[in-house]
Amino acid sequence: MPVAAQPYRQPRVIIPRPDRVRTLTGTSFAWIDTHLARDHWLAAMSPQAIATYTFLCLAANPQGVSWYRRDKIRAAVDLGEDELADAMAALCHLDLVAYQPFHHNASEGFRQVLALPHGGPPPPRRGIQLGALIDSIGTRT
């Protein structure tokens, strides 16, 4: 005889530190989409890309744009220049971040955290030339 499926019951949530419950207050606009975990984006990102993405989310204005210079981002997430360049290139490749130079031939610019693409990350590309991709998006001087 088949066993009837039990209806889902949400567990009783116990808040370990009720005096430290997070709230959305002040002028901060930082947030991270829960689909980043649910749709397997984290598995498609290196630890350096995750750190960089997190920093960009925290530094973004309401439209998702930040204009921190690379040296400030590197210091905040403790990455070398090449590590940051690779992380930025990967985030742009995954269509998670867009880049626009401050002006023609500028080595710095605006970085926008984008709404997550639907359907999760693309399958890994074989043989991607990160150096060419990095040069094309202007993340190296």
Image (cartoon, helix red, strand yellow):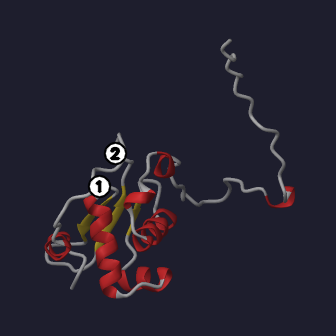
> Residue 97, image x and y in percent?
33, 60
Residue drawn at 25 percent across, 60 percent down: 93
Quarter in which the C terminus is drawn: bottom left
Amino acid type, callout 2: Pro
The answer for how far apart the CA atoms under marks 2 and 1 are is: 7 Å
**With respect to residue 98, does 67 lie above or below?**
below
Q: Secondary structure at mark 2?
A: loop
- Looking at the rendered structure, the secondary structure element under dot 1 is loop
Name the residue at the front extreme.
1
- Give the answer, above or below, for where 29 lies relative to 56: above
Q: Quadrant of the N terminus?
A: top right
Q: Nearer the viewer, residue 82 or 56?
A: 82
Residue 108, horizontal then vertical, whole percent: 27, 78
User: At x 25% / y 72%, what residue is drawn?
Assistant: 102
Res. 23 mark: none
Classify residue 80 as left or right of residue 37: left
Residue 73 occupies quadrant: bottom left
Mark 1 residue type: Asp
Residue 43 in the image, given as x and y percentages of width and height: 42, 58
Q: Residue at horizontal 36%, vertical 80%?
A: 69
Q: Is residue 105 above or below residue 53?
A: below
Bin the neighbour count of mark 1 within 10 Å (Cα to Cα): few under 14, some 14-19, many 20 and up. some
Residue 101 in percent (x, y) is at 23, 70
**Residue 117's mark?**
2
Crowding at dot 2, Cα within 10 Å, few <14 / some 14-19 / many 20+, comes out as: few
**Residue 13 falls left or right of residue 104:** right
Q: Nearer the viewer, residue 36 or 62?
A: 36
The residue carrying mark 1 is 95
Q: Are marks 2 and 1 in contact (CB under 8 Å)?
A: yes
